[in-house]
Image: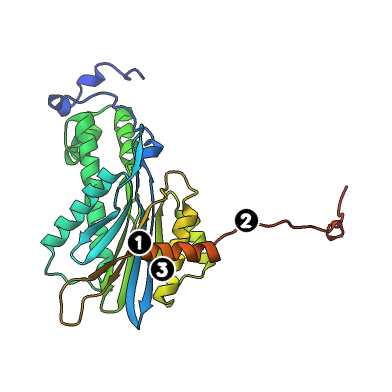
Amino acid sequence: MREPHGKDCANRGPLEQYGIKAYPPRLTERPLWRRKMTCCIAAACEMDDDPRIVLCSDLRVETPEAGAENELKFRWAAENWPALIAGDVARAEGLLQTYLEYRVQRQTVKLTDINILEEFKVPAQLQKRKMIDDYVKSQLGISYSDFLRKGKQALDPDVFRDMLYQIRSILLGCELIITGFTSDGARLLRVDQDCSVSWQQNFSVIGTGASIASAALFQREQSIDLSFEETIYNVYEAQRLAQIAPSVGEDLAINVIAPPKPKGGGIREFALTEDGESYLERQYRKYGLKPVKEIRIDRAFLERIAG
């Protein structure tokens, strides 16, 4: 550990009463098993000229010692707005609780295409503020607000800079895909670890297998204009291909959501049956990636260009 610079630096300033620790430990990189442990996909489509959203995730959850395929990744971010989670489950639960509390306070504000991005951005920022406050309290015994007001004057400059570095390094520890419907159709929003919230036009993928699943969906040219049948197969295929990624399980769950009926009520939810999953698996074996058979390359196909 570094030694304090200057005399009696640990006793300087008005924050002594809070029991400030001179050199708080640095944040360590979160272990791989507590990061992206899953693959979740949401894709918008149409069924009989009516919008639908297909939601899919594996069921894998792990600890350092063991793992199992028994964790549903479907949650709620707000009334009629389901979410898929990836990453640290406890962090995701805490973030979603902040979303639910925020929307309860603003239940009179109707979500529209004009305000939806901002309405779902604020809770992520509030959650990060909570996490920063918890970290500062755990290291210095004071609130983040007190740290901002008095820390620069009360702490050794190296300590203050180190704390700022650690605070900038704090991430949400999870990712979300928030889904739902406005008057203009299906909507997908992605919440990233840095609190950014972005529109996702056709589909969104999070988790360990995201790059593989995204590539598969791009290859299939997955679009919001595709039929429900094409979309649910494309999503299933992408999820199956993503199973090659670390910590992505083989068991999966697929749900489909539809907007409320014109007379009102909540969104309509449907779950894919075992027969439906068996059918998609047969289609995957028929149309999915297959082993390459013997290929003979004529040496004349190669032209020397150097050496």
Residue 274 is tagged as 1
Side (left or right) of 249 relative to 76: right
Quadrant containing the N terminus in the rendered view: top left
Side (left or right) of 160 relative to 251: left
The image quarter in which residue 122 lies? bottom left
The image quarter in which residue 40 lies? bottom left
- Check disc 3 and give the amino acid type: Ile
Measured as percent of width and height from the top left, residue 238 is found at 47, 60
Q: Residues within 10 Å of mark 3 (few under 14, many from 20)?
A: many
- Check disc 1 and give the amino acid type: Glu
Q: SS at mark 1?
A: helix
Side (left or right) of 268 relative to 169: left
Q: SS at mark 2?
A: loop
Sequence-wise, the earlier of marks 1 and 3 is 3
Q: On screen, 193 above or below 66?
A: below
Residue labelled with disc 2: 291
Residue labelled with disc 3: 232
User: Between tags 2 and 1, which lies in front?
Assistant: 1
Measured as percent of width and height from the top left, residue 80 is found at 21, 67
Sequence-wise, the earlier of marks 2 and 3 is 3
Measured as percent of width and height from the top left, residue 210 is found at 44, 54
Q: Residues within 10 Å of mark 1 (few under 14, many from 20)?
A: few
Measured as percent of width and height from the top left, residue 110 is found at 17, 72
The image quarter in which residue 204 lies? bottom left
